[in-house]
Image (tube, rainbow, N blue to C red):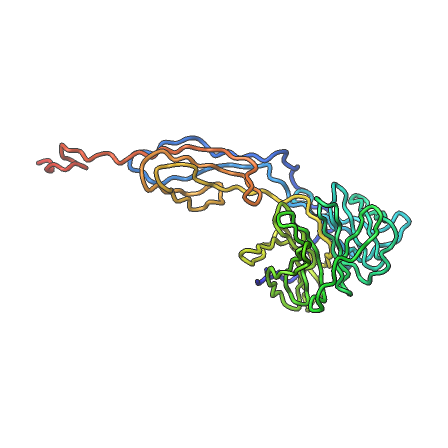
Protein backbone atom coordinates (compact mmCIF):
# COMPACT_ATOMS: atom_id res chain seq x y z
CA UNK A 1 0.00 0.00 0.00
CA UNK A 2 1.30 3.40 -0.95
CA UNK A 3 0.65 5.95 1.76
CA UNK A 4 -0.34 9.51 0.80
CA UNK A 5 2.44 11.78 -0.35
CA UNK A 6 2.62 14.75 1.98
CA UNK A 7 3.80 17.93 0.33
CA UNK A 8 6.96 19.66 1.57
CA UNK A 9 6.11 21.71 4.64
CA UNK A 10 5.49 25.41 4.49
CA UNK A 11 6.47 27.04 7.75
CA UNK A 12 4.24 30.02 7.13
CA UNK A 13 1.22 27.72 6.93
CA UNK A 14 1.38 26.77 10.60
CA UNK A 15 0.36 29.33 13.17
CA UNK A 16 0.73 28.51 16.82
CA UNK A 17 -2.22 30.71 17.73
CA UNK A 18 -5.70 29.21 17.52
CA UNK A 19 -7.46 29.70 14.20
CA UNK A 20 -10.87 31.26 14.83
CA UNK A 21 -13.98 29.95 13.08
CA UNK A 22 -17.75 29.79 13.48
CA UNK A 23 -19.17 28.37 16.72
CA UNK A 24 -19.50 24.60 16.89
CA UNK A 25 -22.88 23.35 15.64
CA UNK A 26 -25.12 21.63 18.18
CA UNK A 27 -26.59 18.62 16.38
CA UNK A 28 -26.28 16.71 13.11
CA UNK A 29 -29.23 17.31 10.75
CA UNK A 30 -30.17 16.63 7.12
CA UNK A 31 -33.00 17.81 4.88
CA UNK A 32 -33.69 15.87 1.67
CA UNK A 33 -35.83 18.66 0.15
CA UNK A 34 -39.41 18.84 -1.13
CA UNK A 35 -41.37 16.00 -2.74
CA UNK A 36 -41.54 16.55 -6.49
CA UNK A 37 -43.51 15.43 -9.56
CA UNK A 38 -41.58 15.61 -12.82
CA UNK A 39 -43.35 16.85 -15.94
CA UNK A 40 -44.41 14.14 -18.33
CA UNK A 41 -41.53 12.88 -20.42
CA UNK A 42 -38.78 14.16 -18.11
CA UNK A 43 -36.33 11.55 -16.82
CA UNK A 44 -33.71 13.64 -15.05
CA UNK A 45 -33.58 16.14 -12.17
CA UNK A 46 -31.33 17.18 -9.30
CA UNK A 47 -31.51 15.97 -5.75
CA UNK A 48 -30.98 19.10 -3.68
CA UNK A 49 -30.48 18.43 0.01
CA UNK A 50 -28.94 20.31 2.87
CA UNK A 51 -27.12 19.24 6.02
CA UNK A 52 -25.30 20.68 9.00
CA UNK A 53 -24.18 20.24 12.56
CA UNK A 54 -21.42 17.78 11.65
CA UNK A 55 -18.87 16.99 14.35
CA UNK A 56 -15.47 18.66 13.98
CA UNK A 57 -12.30 16.72 13.40
CA UNK A 58 -10.79 16.79 16.89
CA UNK A 59 -7.54 15.06 17.82
CA UNK A 60 -4.31 15.48 19.82
CA UNK A 61 -0.70 14.76 18.98
CA UNK A 62 2.42 15.63 20.96
CA UNK A 63 6.19 16.17 20.87
CA UNK A 64 6.67 18.73 18.16
CA UNK A 65 9.91 20.28 16.99
CA UNK A 66 11.20 23.84 17.24
CA UNK A 67 8.63 26.06 18.92
CA UNK A 68 6.35 23.10 19.67
CA UNK A 69 9.03 20.87 21.23
CA UNK A 70 7.64 18.85 24.16
CA UNK A 71 4.22 20.42 23.68
CA UNK A 72 0.70 19.06 23.35
CA UNK A 73 -0.78 19.98 19.95
CA UNK A 74 -4.58 19.93 19.76
CA UNK A 75 -6.35 20.18 16.40
CA UNK A 76 -10.05 21.06 16.16
CA UNK A 77 -11.79 22.14 12.96
CA UNK A 78 -13.55 24.94 14.84
CA UNK A 79 -10.66 26.42 16.85
CA UNK A 80 -7.76 25.31 14.66
CA UNK A 81 -4.41 24.41 16.22
CA UNK A 82 -3.87 24.98 19.93
CA UNK A 83 -0.45 24.40 21.48
CA UNK A 84 -0.27 23.72 25.24
CA UNK A 85 2.67 23.00 27.44
CA UNK A 86 5.32 21.92 27.75
CA UNK A 87 4.23 18.49 28.95
CA UNK A 88 5.49 18.38 32.51
CA UNK A 89 4.75 17.23 36.02
CA UNK A 90 3.34 19.60 38.64
CA UNK A 91 6.90 19.85 39.97
CA UNK A 92 8.13 21.11 36.59
CA UNK A 93 9.89 18.02 35.21
CA UNK A 94 9.44 18.08 31.42
CA UNK A 95 8.29 14.86 29.78
CA UNK A 96 10.18 15.16 26.52
CA UNK A 97 9.17 12.01 24.66
CA UNK A 98 5.44 11.32 24.99
CA UNK A 99 5.24 8.11 22.97
CA UNK A 100 1.46 7.82 22.92
CA UNK A 101 -1.89 8.79 24.43
CA UNK A 102 -4.88 6.57 25.10
CA UNK A 103 -8.32 7.70 26.24
CA UNK A 104 -9.65 5.33 28.92
CA UNK A 105 -13.12 5.88 30.38
CA UNK A 106 -12.84 9.65 29.96
CA UNK A 107 -9.23 9.94 31.18
CA UNK A 108 -6.28 10.44 28.83
CA UNK A 109 -3.26 8.30 29.73
CA UNK A 110 0.23 8.89 28.38
CA UNK A 111 3.45 6.89 28.25
CA UNK A 112 6.79 8.71 28.58
CA UNK A 113 9.82 7.11 26.98
CA UNK A 114 12.76 8.77 28.76
CA UNK A 115 11.36 8.49 32.29
CA UNK A 116 9.45 5.23 31.58
CA UNK A 117 6.36 6.58 33.28
CA UNK A 118 2.67 5.94 32.85
CA UNK A 119 0.73 9.13 33.60
CA UNK A 120 -2.61 10.85 33.23
CA UNK A 121 -2.78 14.04 31.19
CA UNK A 122 -4.66 17.28 31.77
CA UNK A 123 -5.28 18.58 28.25
CA UNK A 124 -5.89 22.15 29.42
CA UNK A 125 -2.59 22.56 31.26
CA UNK A 126 -0.42 19.72 29.85
CA UNK A 127 0.27 18.64 33.44
CA UNK A 128 1.26 14.98 33.68
CA UNK A 129 0.42 13.06 36.85
CA UNK A 130 2.37 9.85 37.35
CA UNK A 131 0.57 6.56 37.88
CA UNK A 132 2.75 4.46 40.16
CA UNK A 133 6.54 4.10 39.92
CA UNK A 134 8.67 4.06 36.79
CA UNK A 135 8.56 0.92 34.61
CA UNK A 136 12.31 0.66 35.04
CA UNK A 137 12.74 -2.90 33.76
CA UNK A 138 12.08 -1.74 30.19
CA UNK A 139 14.24 0.21 27.75
CA UNK A 140 12.14 2.41 25.44
CA UNK A 141 8.40 2.36 25.89
CA UNK A 142 6.21 3.13 22.88
CA UNK A 143 2.52 2.90 22.13
CA UNK A 144 -0.58 2.46 24.24
CA UNK A 145 -3.69 0.40 23.50
CA UNK A 146 -6.73 -0.29 25.67
CA UNK A 147 -9.03 -3.31 25.86
CA UNK A 148 -12.18 -1.84 27.44
CA UNK A 149 -13.91 -5.17 28.04
CA UNK A 150 -11.06 -6.62 30.10
CA UNK A 151 -9.68 -3.30 31.39
CA UNK A 152 -6.23 -4.12 29.97
CA UNK A 153 -3.76 -1.40 28.99
CA UNK A 154 -0.98 -2.49 26.62
CA UNK A 155 2.36 -0.94 25.66
CA UNK A 156 5.47 -2.06 23.77
CA UNK A 157 9.17 -1.89 24.61
CA UNK A 158 10.54 -0.71 21.29
CA UNK A 159 14.08 -1.94 21.96
CA UNK A 160 13.39 -5.39 23.38
CA UNK A 161 10.22 -5.97 21.29
CA UNK A 162 8.23 -6.93 24.39
CA UNK A 163 4.46 -6.45 24.41
CA UNK A 164 3.51 -5.63 27.99
CA UNK A 165 0.31 -5.25 29.99
CA UNK A 166 0.12 -2.43 32.55
CA UNK A 167 -2.27 -1.99 35.45
CA UNK A 168 -3.56 1.54 34.86
CA UNK A 169 -4.06 2.21 38.58
CA UNK A 170 -0.71 0.94 39.92
CA UNK A 171 1.57 0.80 36.82
CA UNK A 172 2.43 -2.82 37.71
CA UNK A 173 3.35 -4.56 34.45
CA UNK A 174 3.78 -8.03 33.01
CA UNK A 175 5.17 -9.30 29.70
CA UNK A 176 2.61 -10.72 27.29
CA UNK A 177 5.05 -11.84 24.59
CA UNK A 178 8.26 -10.94 22.76
CA UNK A 179 7.88 -10.16 19.07
CA UNK A 180 10.15 -11.82 16.49
CA UNK A 181 13.43 -10.03 15.78
CA UNK A 182 12.33 -8.71 12.37
CA UNK A 183 9.84 -6.41 14.10
CA UNK A 184 12.58 -4.19 15.46
CA UNK A 185 10.88 -0.77 15.30
CA UNK A 186 7.32 -1.07 16.57
CA UNK A 187 5.85 2.44 16.63
CA UNK A 188 2.25 2.07 17.71
CA UNK A 189 -0.43 -0.18 19.17
CA UNK A 190 -4.22 -0.31 18.88
CA UNK A 191 -6.78 -2.74 20.25
CA UNK A 192 -9.77 -3.61 18.05
CA UNK A 193 -13.00 -4.47 19.84
CA UNK A 194 -14.48 -6.13 16.73
CA UNK A 195 -12.00 -9.00 16.61
CA UNK A 196 -10.34 -8.77 20.03
CA UNK A 197 -6.88 -8.45 18.49
CA UNK A 198 -3.95 -6.17 19.21
CA UNK A 199 -2.64 -4.33 16.13
CA UNK A 200 0.87 -2.92 15.82
CA UNK A 201 2.76 -0.97 13.16
CA UNK A 202 6.42 -1.73 12.57
CA UNK A 203 8.66 0.70 10.70
CA UNK A 204 11.43 -1.85 10.15
CA UNK A 205 9.20 -4.03 7.95
CA UNK A 206 6.85 -1.15 7.00
CA UNK A 207 3.85 -3.32 7.81
CA UNK A 208 0.72 -3.50 9.93
CA UNK A 209 0.39 -6.69 11.96
CA UNK A 210 -2.06 -8.02 14.55
CA UNK A 211 -1.76 -10.39 17.49
CA UNK A 212 -4.34 -12.98 18.44
CA UNK A 213 -4.17 -12.50 22.19
CA UNK A 214 -5.63 -15.95 22.84
CA UNK A 215 -2.93 -17.81 20.90
CA UNK A 216 -0.26 -15.07 20.53
CA UNK A 217 -0.16 -15.84 16.81
CA UNK A 218 0.89 -12.88 14.62
CA UNK A 219 -1.02 -12.17 11.43
CA UNK A 220 0.05 -9.88 8.58
CA UNK A 221 -2.58 -7.24 7.79
CA UNK A 222 -1.09 -4.91 5.17
CA UNK A 223 2.08 -3.37 3.76
CA UNK A 224 2.79 0.35 4.05
CA UNK A 225 5.60 0.82 1.49
CA UNK A 226 6.11 4.33 2.84
CA UNK A 227 9.85 4.53 2.22
CA UNK A 228 12.75 5.79 4.37
CA UNK A 229 11.44 9.34 4.83
CA UNK A 230 8.06 8.49 6.30
CA UNK A 231 6.66 6.69 9.31
CA UNK A 232 3.32 5.40 10.49
CA UNK A 233 4.09 6.55 13.98
CA UNK A 234 0.95 5.73 15.95
CA UNK A 235 -2.37 3.98 15.30
CA UNK A 236 -5.79 4.13 16.93
CA UNK A 237 -9.23 2.67 16.27
CA UNK A 238 -12.10 5.14 16.26
CA UNK A 239 -15.67 3.93 15.62
CA UNK A 240 -14.22 0.70 14.23
CA UNK A 241 -11.93 2.48 11.75
CA UNK A 242 -8.15 2.45 11.98
CA UNK A 243 -6.41 5.82 11.97
CA UNK A 244 -2.71 6.62 12.03
CA UNK A 245 -0.44 9.55 12.65
CA UNK A 246 1.56 9.64 9.42
CA UNK A 247 4.88 11.50 9.47
CA UNK A 248 7.05 12.54 6.55
CA UNK A 249 10.52 14.03 6.45
CA UNK A 250 11.80 16.75 4.13
CA UNK A 251 15.58 16.32 3.83
CA UNK A 252 15.99 19.79 2.26
CA UNK A 253 14.58 21.59 5.27
CA UNK A 254 15.32 18.89 7.87
CA UNK A 255 11.69 19.16 9.02
CA UNK A 256 9.17 16.47 9.93
CA UNK A 257 5.47 16.97 9.18
CA UNK A 258 2.48 14.99 10.40
CA UNK A 259 -1.02 14.29 9.16
CA UNK A 260 -3.89 12.18 10.41
CA UNK A 261 -4.91 9.43 7.97
CA UNK A 262 -7.43 6.59 7.94
CA UNK A 263 -6.04 3.19 6.99
CA UNK A 264 -8.47 1.22 4.83
CA UNK A 265 -7.21 -2.30 5.45
CA UNK A 266 -9.50 -3.83 2.82
CA UNK A 267 -8.45 -1.65 -0.11
CA UNK A 268 -4.97 -1.06 1.39
CA UNK A 269 -5.05 2.69 0.96
CA UNK A 270 -4.56 5.62 3.31
CA UNK A 271 -7.06 8.47 3.30
CA UNK A 272 -5.72 11.80 4.65
CA UNK A 273 -7.84 13.56 7.28
CA UNK A 274 -7.38 17.13 8.38
CA UNK A 275 -4.45 19.49 8.01
CA UNK A 276 -0.76 18.95 7.45
CA UNK A 277 0.96 20.00 10.69
CA UNK A 278 4.54 21.05 10.01
CA UNK A 279 7.63 20.96 12.21
CA UNK A 280 6.27 18.23 14.46
CA UNK A 281 7.42 14.70 15.33
CA UNK A 282 3.95 13.68 16.61
CA UNK A 283 4.62 10.34 18.26
CA UNK A 284 1.30 10.41 20.12
CA UNK A 285 -2.30 10.29 18.94
CA UNK A 286 -5.73 10.39 20.54
CA UNK A 287 -8.94 11.06 18.57
CA UNK A 288 -12.03 12.70 20.08
CA UNK A 289 -14.30 13.14 17.05
CA UNK A 290 -14.39 12.70 13.27
CA UNK A 291 -16.86 14.50 10.96
CA UNK A 292 -19.93 12.71 9.65
CA UNK A 293 -20.64 12.84 5.91
CA UNK A 294 -23.81 13.02 3.79
CA UNK A 295 -24.81 10.32 1.28
CA UNK A 296 -27.81 9.74 -0.99
CA UNK A 297 -29.35 6.26 -1.26
CA UNK A 298 -32.42 5.03 -3.13
CA UNK A 299 -34.98 3.46 -0.78
CA UNK A 300 -37.64 2.32 -3.26
CA UNK A 301 -38.81 2.67 -6.84
CA UNK A 302 -39.83 0.66 -9.92
CA UNK A 303 -36.22 0.56 -11.13
CA UNK A 304 -32.74 1.59 -10.03
CA UNK A 305 -32.15 5.27 -10.61
CA UNK A 306 -28.65 6.57 -11.29
CA UNK A 307 -27.43 9.00 -8.62
CA UNK A 308 -24.44 10.59 -10.32
CA UNK A 309 -22.81 12.12 -7.21
CA UNK A 310 -23.94 10.02 -4.29
CA UNK A 311 -21.77 11.82 -1.73
CA UNK A 312 -22.82 15.35 -2.80
CA UNK A 313 -25.79 17.21 -1.37
CA UNK A 314 -26.65 18.47 -4.87
CA UNK A 315 -26.59 15.57 -7.33
CA UNK A 316 -28.13 14.83 -10.74
CA UNK A 317 -30.30 11.71 -10.83
CA UNK A 318 -31.73 9.92 -13.87
CA UNK A 319 -34.79 7.65 -13.91
CA UNK A 320 -34.96 4.62 -16.24
CA UNK A 321 -38.75 4.19 -15.91
CA UNK A 322 -41.81 6.11 -14.74
CA UNK A 323 -43.16 5.58 -11.23
CA UNK A 324 -42.64 6.70 -7.66
CA UNK A 325 -39.11 6.84 -6.27
CA UNK A 326 -38.04 7.46 -2.68
CA UNK A 327 -34.54 8.70 -1.85
CA UNK A 328 -32.94 9.12 1.55
CA UNK A 329 -30.28 11.62 2.48
CA UNK A 330 -28.22 10.12 5.29
CA UNK A 331 -25.69 11.61 7.65
CA UNK A 332 -23.30 8.75 8.32
CA UNK A 333 -20.22 8.04 10.36
CA UNK A 334 -18.43 5.24 8.51
CA UNK A 335 -21.72 3.83 7.18
CA UNK A 336 -23.41 4.02 10.57
CA UNK A 337 -26.49 6.20 10.03
CA UNK A 338 -26.64 9.13 12.46
CA UNK A 339 -29.80 10.73 11.06
CA UNK A 340 -31.72 10.67 7.77
CA UNK A 341 -34.52 12.34 5.78
CA UNK A 342 -36.50 11.14 2.74
CA UNK A 343 -37.86 12.74 -0.41
CA UNK A 344 -40.35 11.28 -2.93
CA UNK A 345 -40.02 11.87 -6.68
CA UNK A 346 -42.90 10.94 -9.01
CA UNK A 347 -41.88 10.37 -12.63
CA UNK A 348 -44.77 10.53 -15.10
CA UNK A 349 -44.84 8.47 -18.30
CA UNK A 350 -44.56 10.14 -21.66
CA UNK A 351 -47.84 11.45 -23.05
CA UNK A 352 -49.32 9.25 -25.77
CA UNK A 353 -49.01 10.62 -29.32
CA UNK A 354 -51.87 12.78 -30.66
CA UNK A 355 -53.97 10.36 -32.73
CA UNK A 356 -55.68 13.24 -34.55
CA UNK A 357 -52.51 14.22 -36.29
CA UNK A 358 -50.69 17.50 -36.13
CA UNK A 359 -47.49 18.11 -34.21
CA UNK A 360 -46.67 15.02 -32.16
CA UNK A 361 -49.49 12.96 -33.77
CA UNK A 362 -49.50 9.95 -36.05
CA UNK A 363 -52.12 11.23 -38.57
CA UNK A 364 -51.49 13.13 -41.77
CA UNK A 365 -49.98 16.56 -41.59
CA UNK A 366 -52.39 19.46 -41.91
CA UNK A 367 -52.93 20.82 -45.38
CA UNK A 368 -52.14 24.49 -46.02
Q: Residue furthest left?
A: 367
Q: Is residue 197 left or right of residue 365?
A: right
| Residue 2 x %, y % | 57, 63
User: Where 181 falls versus 199 (above or below)?
Assistant: below
Which quadrant would the C terminus be assigned to in this image?
top left
User: Where 260 falls versus 310 (above or below)?
Assistant: below
Q: Is residue 30 left or right of residue 120?
A: left
Q: Is residue 324 left or right of residue 157?
A: left
| Residue at screen point 11% across, 38% down | 365
* Residue 86 visible to an observer of this rendering: no
Seen from the viewer's position, the closer of residues 338 and 279 is 338
| Residue 210 x %, y % | 65, 58
| Residue 245 x %, y % | 67, 55
| Residue 133 x %, y % | 88, 52
| Residue at screen point 89% across, 47% down | 90
Seen from the viewer's position, the closer of residues 197 and 221 is 197
User: Where 324 falls versus 123 (above or below)?
Assistant: above
Seen from the viewer's position, the closer of residues 144 and 1 is 144
Counting labels gives 0
Amino acid sequence: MQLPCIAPPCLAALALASLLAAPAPAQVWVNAGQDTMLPAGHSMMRLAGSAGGFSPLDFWVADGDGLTENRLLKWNDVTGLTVVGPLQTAAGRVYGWPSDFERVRGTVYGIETFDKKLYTLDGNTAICTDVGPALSSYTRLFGLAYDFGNDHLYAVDNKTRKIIKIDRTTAVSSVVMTLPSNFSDVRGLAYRVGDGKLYFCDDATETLQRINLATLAIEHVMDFNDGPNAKVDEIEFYEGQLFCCYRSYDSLTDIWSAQLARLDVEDEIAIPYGPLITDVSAHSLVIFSVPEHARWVQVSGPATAQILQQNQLDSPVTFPAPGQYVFELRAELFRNVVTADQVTIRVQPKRPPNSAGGPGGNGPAPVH
